[in-house]
Amino acid sequence: MVGSLFPSLTSRCSGLFEVKKETLKENDILLFQGDSITDAFRVRDNFAANHQRALGVGFVHNLASFLLGKYPEKKLKNI
């Protein structure tokens, strides 16, 4: 998307960064790490995978929800 919005920037940066495409495998565990903004009101003593209160209400919860909804067959665990 950045390339379509800023083509001249993309062409100048081409080759500076190698982008590695990762794939999700069945039963993968996704660990989210961050700071107080990442926490977004998560319940710190809840360690249950895929539990909303353990993930908070911020981007971690949004990304986890998206991935779980898009790839239910992969049985991902977000912690």
Image (spheres, rainbow, N blue to C red):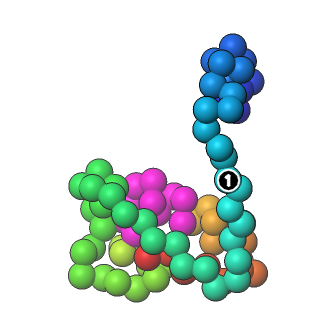
**Residue position for label 1:** 20
Q: What element carries label 1?
A: loop
**In the rendered image of this protein, does residue 14 appear above or below residue 8?**
below
- In the rendered image, residue 32, in percent from the top left (x then y), is placed at 42, 66
**In the rendered image of this protein, does residue 66 appear above or below residue 20?**
below
State the residue lying farthest toward the front. Answer: 15
- Residue 54 visible? The answer is yes
- In the rendered image, residue 15, in percent from the top left (x then y), is placed at 68, 32
- In the rendered image, residue 77, in percent from the top left (x then y), is placed at 54, 80
- From the viewer's perspective, is 20 left or right of 45? right
Q: Which one is nearer the viewer's eye here, 22 or 44?
A: 22
Which image quarter: residue 26? bottom right
User: Which residues fall within the magenta stretch?
Assistant: 55-64
In percent of the image, x 30 and y 82: which residue is there?
46
In percent of the image, x 24 and y 82: which residue is there?
45
Q: What residue type is labelled 1?
A: Lys
- From the viewer's perspective, is 18 left or right of 60? right
- Residue 5 visible? The answer is no
State the residue lying farthest toward the top. Answer: 8
Which image quarter: residue 3? top right
- In the rendered image, residue 20, in percent from the top left (x then y), is placed at 67, 53
Q: Which one is nearer the viewer's eye here, 34 or 48?
A: 34
Q: In which quarter of the image is the C terminus?
A: bottom left
